């Protein structure tokens, strides 16, 4: 059977594959310590679930506008105005089937053959694959631990060519957990304006910050950069709504209309009653977000301290999200070889850094319970010591 050429250019998601393998092992009764999934281990807060139940009971089960429920679009615009100082109105918002869908639609609307998209590495696994599906060219810019795994203004400036269409900024970062400081964001914004390129800011982890780290949305820096900014976000991480599949894109009207047309001919509206849960998430009590953030902060400290006692491993302390990115270069193994052995020998699931453009690293998610962290890192230590 002949398949479209675009499919052959795309790499399957290692994160989903390893998470699925770990879950299958658990179903078979194997004691697996999984650090693979980028998914909070908390249940969705009750007031959000209740809002969806009430929406079901009141008949919110019909087709809705392809761009999203008007009440939710207005609530998202209000959130962006008050939390992020971004002057979007409801007409600048489209509700999507998760944050990933918002980015995919954007690539389909903006990118075509010959266009370049600048992506700092380490990167979230789907960024370059989405660019390839849109027939664009991912331009990967390597960062280092010395820079906190963050692209510098000079690196960005040097990567820009006449073919550059878009720059992807992700802060807090998946997979590194690092956060661009307000000063770093302002410096990046200067280059965006100077070179007149577009920037999409993936802010899905913005509520998960530690040790006084501050999130500044790049579009809030100036009116000039705001005009060139697209925001991608959603409800999965901060509100533990991963399975609800509700995300959003905020963009200038011309881009928003193009994305809306694509969505209208592909998925149409997001699940109607799920959108009412998202409204409750934004307009309801926010203490649930803080409770989860504090739990993640405690786990972050524990896993960071434990990993740094293991000879041969090094890592930076993450500023946000719920990942820790570990350098394994001293072991002389590829990240895939390392993770395969770790899962088969010690029943610990981790994600190889090659999936993120950093083959000398692995990613652990600490969106899991403290018992799993203690047991899993002990097994990791045993595995590393057998090879170091």
Image (cartoon, rainbow, N blue to C red):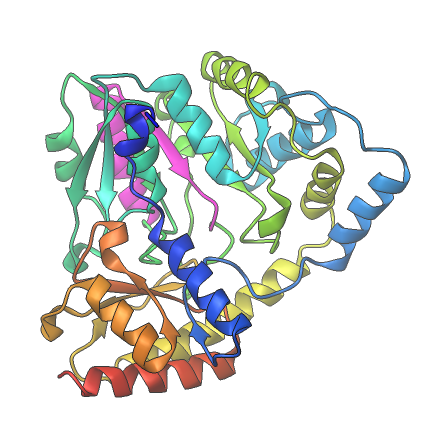
Considering only vertical position in the picture, is 169 above or below 165? below
Residue at 32% in and 49% down: 180
Residue at 76% in and 58% down: 46
Q: Position of residue 301 (x, y in %)?
A: 40, 76
Residue at 76% in and 38% down: 273
Q: Is residue 133 left or right of residue 151?
A: right
Q: Is residue 356 magenta?
A: no
Q: Looking at the rendering, in which quadrant would you find the N terminus?
A: top left
Q: Position of residue 261 (x, y in %)?
A: 54, 14
Q: Residue pushed farthest front?
A: 1
- How many discs mark residues in the rendered view? 0
Residue situated in front as seen by the camera: 259 or 186: 259
Q: Is residue 186 magenta?
A: yes
Residue 212 visible? The answer is no
Q: Looking at the rendering, in which quadrant would you find the C terminus?
A: bottom left
Residue span colored magenta: 181-205
Residue at 23% in and 62% down: 336
Q: Quadrant of residue 64?
A: top right
Q: Position of residue 70 (x, y in %)?
A: 71, 24
Q: Quadrant of residue 325?
A: bottom left
Residue situated in front as seen by the camera: 240 or 317: 240
Q: Is residue 371 left or right of residue 110?
A: right
Q: Position of residue 370 (x, y in %)?
A: 50, 80
Q: Is residue 64 left or right of residue 94?
A: right
């Amino acid at each position: 059977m002949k398949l479209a050429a675009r499919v052959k250019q795309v790499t399957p998601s290692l994160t989903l594959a390893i998470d699925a393998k770990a879950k299958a092992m658990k179903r078979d009764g194997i004691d697996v310590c999984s650090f693979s999934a980028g998914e909070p281990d908390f249940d969705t807060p009750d007031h959000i679930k209740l809002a969806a139940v009430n929406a079901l009971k009141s008949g919110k089960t019909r087709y809705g506008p392809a761009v999203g429920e008007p009440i939710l679009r207005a609530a998202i615009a209000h959130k962006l105005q008050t939390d992020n100082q971004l002057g979007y109105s409801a007409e600048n918002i489209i509700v999507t089937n998760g944050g990933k869908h918002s980015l995919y639609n954007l690539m389909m609307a903006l990118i075509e053959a010959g266009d370049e998209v600048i992506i700092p590495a380490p990167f979230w696994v789907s960024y370059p694959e989405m660019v390839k599906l849109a027939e664009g060219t991912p331009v990967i810019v390597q960062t280092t631990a010395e820079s906190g795994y963050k692209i510098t203004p000079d690196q960005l400036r040097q990567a820009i060519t006449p073919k550059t269409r878009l720059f992807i900024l992700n802060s807090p970062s998946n997979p590194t957990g690092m956060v661009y400081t307000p000063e770093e964001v302002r410096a990046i914004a200067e280059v965006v304006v100077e070179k007149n390129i577009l920037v999409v800011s993936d802010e899905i982890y913005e509520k998960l910050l530690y040790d006084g780290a501050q999130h500044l949305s790049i579009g809030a820096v100036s009116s000039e950069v705001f005009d060139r900014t697209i925001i991608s976000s959603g409800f999965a991480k901060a509100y533990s709504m991963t399975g609800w599949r509700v995300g959003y894109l905020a963009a200038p009207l011309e881009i928003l209309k193009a994305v809306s047309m694509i969505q209208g001919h592909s998925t149409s509206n997001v699940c109607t009653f799920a959108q009412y849960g998202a409204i409750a998430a934004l307009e309801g009590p926010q203490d649930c977000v803080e409770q989860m953030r504090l739990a993640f902060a405690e786990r972050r400290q524990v896993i960071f301290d434990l990993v740094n006692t293991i000879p041969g491993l090094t890592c930076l302390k993450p500023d946000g999200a719920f990942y820790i990115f570990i350098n394994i270069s001293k072991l002389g193994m590829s990240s895939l070889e390392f993770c395969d052995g770790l899962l088969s020998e010690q029943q610990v699931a981790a994600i190889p850094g090659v999936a993120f453009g950093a083959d000398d690293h692995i990613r652990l998610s600490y969106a899991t319970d403290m018992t799993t962290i203690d047991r899993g890192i002990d097994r990791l230590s045993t595995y590393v010591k057998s090879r170091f």
